[in-house]
Amino acid sequence: MTSTAPAEQTAAHGVTLTPVAVEKVASLLQQEGRDDLRLRLAVQPGGCSGLIYQLYFDERLMEDDLTVDFSGVEVVVDKMSAPYLSGATIDFSDTIEKQGFTIDNPNAQSSCACGDSFS
């Protein structure tokens, strides 16, 4: 049961998490057994289309980071990545065809076949 409706809207960095993604991230954080981690989404040069997504747990919080809390899941985007990610939605799929996090980014003009990079 995948939902594409965001858990809540935000203006801080423009990224939203679906309720399914919030639930999965919360579950993963609980498995880690740490309460000092947040989900970081960033964009870096690389990949076959020019830019790649970085999605990982991070204990650091930088001065210029933009943060939004989604039902106890803190999502952090650095100031340089924010313009590339504004309007993006993070979802989680768990089906027989596909399992994992996906990023639907309206700023991506094109992406590679594997879906890991965009321009």
Image (cartoon, grey):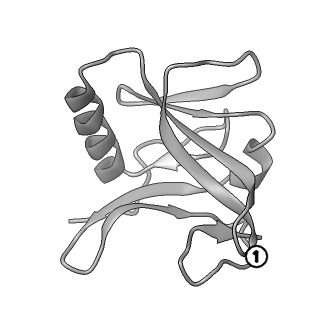
**Residue at horizontal 76%, vertical 76%?**
109
Q: Nearer the viewer, residue 73 or 54?
A: 54
- Which percent across, then down, holds residue 11? 66, 37
Mark 1, secondary structure of its residue: loop
Q: Nearer the viewer, residue 38 or 44?
A: 44
Using the image, determine if residue 61 lies above or below residue 115.
above
Using the image, determine if residue 34 lies above or below residue 6.
above
**Residue at horizontal 77%, vertical 70%?**
119
- Which percent across, then down, holds residue 103? 52, 61
Using the image, determine if residue 111 lies above or below residue 76.
below
Using the image, determine if residue 113 lies above or below residue 54.
below
- Which percent across, then down, holds residue 116? 57, 68
* Amino acid type at image mark 1: Gln
**Residue at horizontal 67%, vertical 60%?**
52
Number of on-image labels: 1
**Disc 1 crowd, CA 10 A, few/some/many (<14, 14-19, 20+):** few
Q: Name the residue under label 1.
A: 109
**Residue at horizontal 67%, vertical 38%?**
13
Outermost residue to the bottom = 113
Q: In this view, does 33 lie to the left or right of 104?
A: left
**Which image quadrant is residue 60 in?**
top right
Q: Is residue 22 left or right of residue 85?
A: left
- Which percent across, then down, holds residue 67? 60, 27
Quadrant of the image for the N terminus?
bottom left
